[in-house]
Image (cartoon, rainbow, N blue to C red):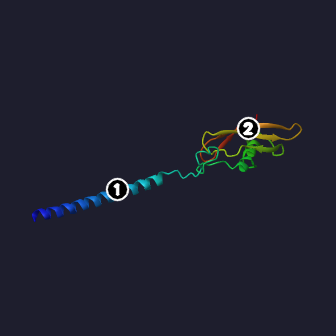
Amino acid sequence: MAQQRGDVKSDKAIKVAAAATIAAAIITAAASIIVALLNQDSDPTPESAPDRPRFSEKLFDEAALEGERGVMRVLIENYGLSADEIQHVDCPADQKVEKGNTFTCVVELSGDDPESKVVGITVLDDDGAYQVDRPR
């Protein structure tokens, strides 16, 4: 009988150990899934479409950049152009608001001798401050 009791205790110990092992495996799997979900890139843009902007990127509003309070304003206030002689400002779409990003805009001038000038734009910080170079 002593041996039977040992077998019963042994069976119980095996069942408890098996249950603990299964519970540990389930907890580990759940934790791995949670970590994977937390680390997952929330960008729905597939990697096969690199030309599309990522939702996490900040982009300049093209209309605001080209408008009276954007590049046009800097040209008037800093470079002495008049609002009447600036016919149109054309900046490229989807420009990143990212320190160090550079691009150019085309300024159409009117008047006696209409012409196009190019102005360089340098993004100064990640908040959208930018510098407009002298028209050339």
Q: Say what secondary structure mark 1 lies in.
A: helix
Give the residue drawn at x 32%, y 58%.
22
| Image height of 50 relative to 13, above or below | above
Amino acid type, callout 2 = Val
In the image shown, does 44 or 95 lie closer to the viewer? 44
Residue 74 placement, left or right of 127? right
| Image height of 10 relative to 127, above or below | below
Q: Position of residue 66 (x, y in %)?
A: 74, 47
Q: Position of residue 19 (x, y in %)?
A: 29, 61
Give the residue drawn at x 64%, y 44%.
51
Q: In this view, which residue lies farthest toward the top? A: 136
Q: Quadrant of the C terminus?
A: top right
Crowd rating for badge 1 (residues with CA inside 10 Å; few <14, some 14–19, many 20+): few
- Identify the residue position indicated by label 1 in the image: 25
Residue 111 placement, left or right of 1? right
| Image height of 110 relative to 5, above or below | above
Q: Quadrant location of residue 34?
A: bottom left
Q: Say what secondary structure mark 2 lies in.
A: strand
Which mark identifies residue 126? Answer: none
Q: Quadrant location of residue 77?
A: top right
Q: Quadrant of the N terminus?
A: bottom left
Q: Quadrant location of residue 107?
A: top right
Which mark identifies residue 119? Answer: 2
Give the residue drawn at x 81%, y 37%.
116
Dot 1 or dot 2: first in sequence order is 1
Give the residue drawn at x 81%, y 41%.
108
Q: Position of residue 6 (x, y in %)?
A: 14, 62
Q: In this view, which residue lies farthest toward the left? A: 2
Label 1 to label 2: alpha-carbon separation: 62 Å
Residue 40 placement, left or right of 46? left
Amino acid type, callout 1 = Ala
